Image (tube, rainbow, N blue to C red):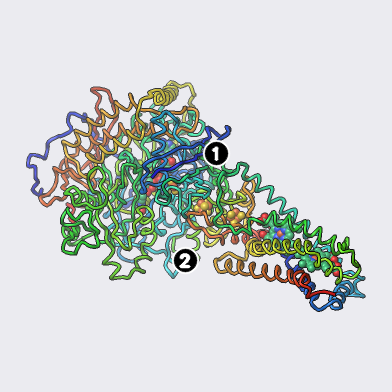
Amino acid sequence: MTKPKILDSDFWGRNDAAEYFDLGDGIADEKAPPGPLDKKWETREFEARIANPANRRRLSIIVVGTGLAGASAAATLGEAGYVVKSFCYQDSPRRAHSIAAQGGINAAKNYKGDGDSVFRLFYDTIKGGDYRSRESNVYRLAEVSRNIIDQCVAQGVPFAREYGGLLDNRSFGGVQVSRTFYARGQTGQQLLLGAYQALERQVAAGTVKTYSRHEMLELIVVDGRARGIIVRDLVSGEIETYFADVVVLASGGYGNVFFLSTNAMGSNVTASWRAHRKGAYMANPCFTQIHPTCIPVTGTHQSKLTLMSESLRNDGRIWVPKDAADADKDPREIPEEDRDYYLERIYPAFGNLVPRDIASRQAKNVCDEGRGVGPEVDGVRRGVYLDFADAMERLGRKAIEEKYGNLFDMYAQITGEDPYQVPMRIYPAVHYVMGGLWVDYDLQSTIPGLFVTGEANFSDHGANRLGASALMQGLADGYFVLSNTIRDYLADGPFEKIDEDHPAVVEAQQSVQSRVDRFLSVNGTRSVDSYHRELGNIMWEYCGMERTEDGLKKAIDLIRGLRDDFWRNVRVLGTAESLNQSLERAGRVADFLELGELMCIDALHRRESCGGHFRAESQTEDGEALRDDDHYAYVAAWEWKGLDVGEKPVLHKEDLVYENIELKQRSYK
Amino acid sequence: MNLTLKIWRQPDPVSEGALATYQVEDISEDMSFLEMLDVLNERLNSEGEEPIAFDSDCREGICGMCGLMINGDAHGPLRTTTCQLHMRTFKDGETITIEPWRSTAFPVLKDLCVDRRAFDRIIQQGGYVSVNTGAAPDAHAMPVPKAQADRAFDTATCIGCGACVASCPNGSASLFLGAKITHLGELPQGQAERDTRVVKMVAQHDHEGFGGCTNIGECAAACPKEIPLDVISQLNKDLRTAVRHGY
Amino acid sequence: MAASGLIFVLFVLLHMYGNLKAFGGEHAFNTYAHHLRTFGEPMLPYGGLLWIVRAVLIVSLVVHVATAATLWKRARRARRVRYAVKKNTGATWASLLMRWGGVTLLLFIIWHLLNFTIGKINVTGGPTDNPYRLLVDTFDTWWLTLIYLVAMAMLGAHLHHGVWSACQTLGLTSNARARRRAKAFGLVLALVITIGFSLVPIFTVFGVISY
Ligand SMILES: Cc1cc2nc3c(=O)[nH]c(=O)nc-3n(C[C@H](O)[C@H](O)[C@H](O)COP(=O)(O)OP(=O)(O)OC[C@H]3O[C@@H](n4cnc5c(N)ncnc54)[C@H](O)[C@@H]3O)c2cc1C
Ligand code: HEM
Ligand code: HEM
Ligand code: SF4
Ligand code: F3S
Ligand code: FES
């Protein structure tokens, strides 16, 4: 590949992060069988050993998380006859964060006959991920995507249908085919309820036991194998220990490290981070997806951000005033010639439909130039207009109401403005993390017996995820992949029974207990939330849409300082023996404070721009992301070494080999 | 704006609770109701008083985790979830009474948090289609007429928040129950278990200690997802059919 | 509940029709009262039909009151701690009045039977063996009329909600249109019955019905 000219000619080959990490051995997936791409999964399914059905009742599985990935896995494993324990921190499994997904779920069904295929979905996903994902995994994802739809329909998931009674599809996230299945704007909800119901069915059948309002706080590793977890019963405060032959983490994404995100308030990294500290590698932690169409922040009280479906960009036109002086004018009074439809201007071919990362970054740029609109928060207006005036003229108000009515209502409810009259204001927000625990083709982490599914693993989306593909991945992992790979591991079980007083168990219990005690005994002056908010600001400023060497280094210093202060000055009231939401948050924030640093180190070491990761130093002359396949076509898998002086994370590289797809530089001009 | 809040405080499931009064100042109209409580909690924390426990997760109106009785209205005066209620709905100087859902089947855990696992147990009694993973025919094998598909969807949007129970003078969960019965009953996939589903789910509903429905209609008026009263009639109809079939 | 309630509805409709005969004067009304008792003779003994009706009514009453009591008890158990503040936004006042309205009706029926059937109490001291005169004497007494009119208002409210509620309970209203219809039907029926029953006492007070 010929490299376009870049701004900093000295950039390539330098290592910004050298002082922050050590380089370890390479790592590779050893589970994907050799042979042609389209035979790998079939082969693996066949070769993976089967645990004797009579034996299954003696094999136990812990599943942490009841989102799409966790609920589907627990239900399926329960059906297979294993003894399953399922955990979530909400009061019911049905409330897992997957419930909030709006847009849809992809599947290569080709019901529209528009030329879709497994290979095309595979290709789009790899390309969308900016060539930073593993071919074998992505191909399998595309393959099983078709079964997902069959399964969900059989469960009674009410997907949108056409008048003929057959399923409807739409095109989503800028792909050329219509492969997205949807249930109005509530696809995640309907899919999750399907999985939740399947789960409850197993509860009734006695194969699954659910533990809601239980939070996993530690992983138990005995003789190198994951053998259980320590949880806190969030109601009684009891610290409880559960053992199993295998542990599955399906605990979702960690976007809340940014404090403000579209994730649920409780979304956290604790389960993953605890596993990371016990030896599971964390892969590509800095790969974050920022969604361009969210409702802007209104003030410092803001607790979370609300996503507006991406589909709005199909008809809405995005603009800001040409002149910063117009920022607080009534937008309807700004004449056409004083408006800058910047996406249409910069990307005439794709216009308002450019991928998420590009749309997000350009919004940030215009706001940084001072041309943002809406209320000033901390001295800057962070918002751009999404204007439906043209569409309304062209299609009529009624058509717009039909298409987007519920979104417009939601917007009106939150902002108090009528989007039919005044253009909407939108701004990017953290939405999804592509990074997560490293897993092999079997979805097994670097700790034997610890499997990771859904958003919690890093597996399929590379540096950027396509719209409607996270739901697909969660369900693919849970319904179809995990049950087939975990059996190979379990075929060696049941493993030796573990005593409560095994040193590894006692150590884990004590570390949980002492952490809880410590939170309650610091008795400083600042609330947990104030630390979280400050961490979020640091992350957003320096590890958000645009990252630079200086910024990231500064962020690492700031985070270290903040973490230090947290442990000396946080104030958590109440007791450990009752429902204590501050205490819950303290644990989560403490882990975010460690994760944040690793994300910055990861971002710092990856001196290229790819997908959602934009290093300002690595861009083309016209400001586009510039990949460096020669140096960075790998997965960065980080090993935990500790936080003390002299302890640095160790980087293990998994080289990405593309045998079926040719690497290309993205272009949306 | 400035407000007076009367909030139910109860340290644990067994202790007695009581309303406590708090003043909050400088509340912005753009805050959501829960953000207003966040602000209060932040202050309580700095004053050394334990923050008020209340549930929320998505804060987007979809997970069903939030739910407060606000001035006698489940989820407040608007037809929405508590997390989607904004302070511009209230007037400066107003007094707002905030209580947890009151239902014997939803015991209070602490302050404003209640335990709604009874809903899960109702679903366990048949709120599903029995199909094992991998056993499904092609999704297009069974077309569903659009009208039925739409009704199934309308009723499937229930978020399990419990506002129907909280607002019903009888403490009945019939709207929640009817929503699931109607969702699965409208679809061809749900037919095989239609009779047993309704019988078992109703039995579990009664067993949990929810009240009986006398068609008062508070539930549908409070339901943030606008589940209509029709589903309760459908529930009764299905129950009658099942009994006729000998279940 | 619904079945017994609907039996009551049928009964009160017929009963109202009978009462309206009072406008036909003493003869018409008394003939009707007599006819009620001889209907079906000689297949049925004197008063046979009336006794069948009475049996059905008594069974319905027992069922109706028993189910009402169960529902009431369940509701009390389902919410042991009351709200400090509770608004009603979806309920009609009629629906909230069902239980106390029902108790009122029960008390009314007891009095009513003492008045006209079992006790034949004529507070004016007039004759008790002439149904027509008993009726006129009763409603010539203003406070008795008032009791009856209040009871009829209660009955109206009970039916306004009860009829729609019975349709809902019987599963007849599982779509929005049927629901609206049932509500309208309940209201009309309640009005017809309340007004229909009230005519006789009112017109007696004003002397239109007299002897
Ligand atoms: C607003 C929004 C809209 C989206 N829309 C789409 C879309 O249209 N299409 C699409 O494909 N994707 C979409 N996504 C992304 C997608 O929803 C998520 O990536 C996906 O649902 C994650 O599923 P999951 O099962 O991995 O985790 P989650 O659904 O996040 O579930 C996590 C589970 O883990 C549990 N848990 C977490 N930590 C602990 C702990 N320490 N102890 C015990 N339990 C724990 C939680 O209780 C929960 O049950 C959207 C995301 C957002 C935020
Ligand atoms: C004897 C005294 C009566 C009592 C104590 C009584 C009480 C009740 C009660 C408690 C209910 C349940 C509804 C609720 O709780 O909201 C009810 C329902 C009803 N009642 Fe009565 N009632 C009485 C007489 C009548 C009469 C005389 C009629 C008709 C003329 C009637 C018709 C109905 C109907 C149609 C219902 C609705 C049934 C349903 O919801 O399925 N009731 N009654
Ligand atoms: C103003 C209204 C009413 C008037 C004038 C009225 C009048 C009468 C009269 C005259 C009788 C005696 C009939 C006979 O024995 O020949 C009677 C009987 C009776 N009425 Fe009414 N009635 C009224 C309302 C009601 C209502 C609302 C109810 C029920 C809820 C009711 C229930 C009965 C019953 C059960 C009997 C006894 C029938 C029997 O078994 O003999 N009445 N009424
Ligand atoms: S029916 Fe409505 S009020 Fe009841 S649980 Fe469902 S969404 Fe909530
Ligand atoms: S308010 Fe209650 S009585 Fe029935 S109609 Fe709704 S459940
Ligand atoms: S917090 Fe999820 S619905 Fe309100």
| Contact flag, marks 2 and 1 (Cβ < 8 Å) | no
**Disc on the earlier residue, 2 or 1:** 1
Query: CB of residue at label 1: within 8 Å of ligand 4?
Result: no
The image shows residue A620 at horizontal and vertical percentages of: 12, 49
Which residue position holds label 2?
A: B143
The reply, left or right, for residue A641 in relation to residue B80 is left
Q: Amino acid at mark 1?
A: Val
Q: Residue at x 53, y 62 (%)?
A: B186
The disc placed on residue B108 is 1
The reply, left or right, for residue A653 in relation to residue A256 is left
Q: Amino acid at mark 2?
A: Pro
The reply, left or right, for residue B129 in relation to residue A544 is right
Report the front residue among A621 and C59: C59
Q: Chain of mark 2?
A: B
How packed is label 1: few (under 14 Cα within 10 Å), some, or many (20 or more)? many
Q: Residue at x 50, y 65 (%)?
A: B148
The image shows residue A503 at horizontal and vertical percentages of: 43, 20
Asked whether the residues under marks 2 and 1 belong to the same chain, the reply is: yes
- Kind of element beneath mark 1: strand
Report the front residue among C1 and B135: C1
Report the front residue among B29 and A338: B29
Q: Distance between the Cα atoms at labels 2 and 1?
A: 45 Å
With respect to residue C182, does B159 lie above or below?
A: above
